[in-house]
Structure formats: structure tokens, C-alpha cells
Amino acid sequence: MKRSAVFAFLGLLCLVLLAVAGCGKSTRTAAVPRPEGKLAVAGFTNPTYNWELLAGYLEEEGKPAPAGTIETLDMILADTLHEHQVFDYITPDAVRQCEDVVVFEDSGKPKVSAWKYWLGVGKCIQADYLLVPQLTTWHERVGSEMGVETPASVAIDFYLIDVKQERMIRSRYEETQQALLENLYNAKKYAARGGKWVTATRLAQDGMDEKLMELGL
């Protein structure tokens, strides 16, 4: 083995060890203050057409996530909010009642239609803020934790709607897992995952933890 290769390997090893050493010792805090007022949390939706989105575009229309995915994401969302000590909020079950009451009216402008619908849901539930999570990409890994033909890939949008001010903040998580050598900036994340190829569910867990913090939740 050439000396340069040895140094490269040792440097990579040190990077991983430093990342491992940092795991579990740092305490993450929200990037912004927690929203003040009554918070409502909607359950996950999985838009399959662009007109259902609050922002952005789908990579391919008409391709829903596998059965059971949304239910799994709802459970992870509840667990993550609990871990972040967000307890006092109107639950997705309660919000769903307003989702059934408010009519999605086609205004001819896709994003406007979705915006008016979710704003209406927020007003119906009488919340100050409404969190709307939308799953837009879900590809499970093809392979195992030791090696893959295709890595897992996930994209989730979190929209925090200020109902009274009629505005919203978008926080998007999008990741296709990469090998460490493809992106050394992900060394800490790579170490936290045990150096393994993870499932789409694990990517979603990491994404929720990160993006809810960005919204102050």
C-alpha cells in the first residue's frame, strides 16, 4: 500500500472516530423559538399530483408510497414531537375532522388551491399554527444494511402555517443516502447510523428530528 493511500485511510478513520465521539454528547436545540399560541398538527399526506402540493413539484406524478407508509410516519412524527417535549397540541385525529369538513376548491391555480384548503383547516380547528407534513418521495433501499444496489431516498416537506397572519414557513428534508467516501461532510451522520445502509424509515426519522428543530418544534 502506498504511503499516500495509508495517510488517506488514516485521515478517514480519524474523521469517523471524531464523528463517533461527538455522537450522544451534544444537545441539539431548536434553531428558532417555539411558536407561541395554539398548535395543531395534521397527519401526513402523500400528494400524488402537483395540484395537491403547497409548494414545489413531484419528481413523478401518480406514484403513491407503499401501503402503511403514512401510518408509520404519523407514529414517528408523534414520537419525535414527544422527544422534543412538544406535548400541548391539537392532534392529527382532531385536525382530520376539519379536513373532512373543509372543501378543497379548485381555483385554477394549484398551489393557491392547496394553500386555501390548509388555511381553511387551520381556521376550522381554531389554531394559531398548523403543521402540515407532506411526503413527496419514498424509495426503499434495494439491498441490505451491508450493501445496496440502490440506496433509500426520502423527501418530506414540513409547512408551519401561521393561521392568523396567513403565511407559512417551509422546511424541506431530502436525502438519498450516500457512502461516506461520496460525501465526507456526512461523516457524523454516517457514524450515527453505524456505518450501515439504512431504510427509508430511518431517513425519515432523521429528517423529522432535523426539520422540526428548524421550525422551533
Image (cartoon, rainbow, N blue to C red):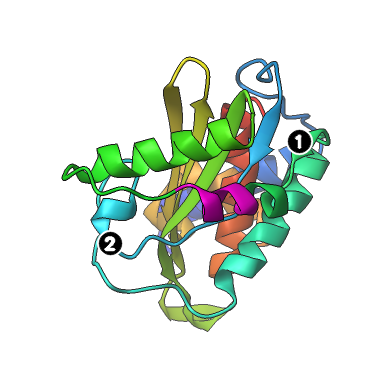
**Magenta residues: mostly which secondary structure?**
helix
Secondary element at image label 1: strand
Q: Which residues are magenta?
A: 96-102
Can residue 211 be seen in the rendering of this structure?
Answer: yes
- How far apart, in angstroms, are the residues tagged by discs 1 and 2? 29 Å
Left or right placement of residue 69 versus residue 2 in this view: right
> x%, y% of residue 217?
68, 31
Left or right placement of residue 146 versus residue 7 in this view: right
Q: Which residue is mark 1?
A: 89
Q: Which mark is residue 7?
A: none
Amino acid marked by disc 2 = Tyr
Determine if the magenta segment contains residue 74: no
Residue sitting at 64 percent across and 68 percent down? 71
Circle 1 crowding by C-alpha within 10 Å: few under 14, some 14–19, many from 20 = some
Secondary element at image label 2: loop
Q: Which mark is residue 49?
A: 2
Left or right placement of residue 73 versus residue 57 in this view: right
Circle 2 crowding by C-alpha within 10 Å: few under 14, some 14–19, many from 20 = some
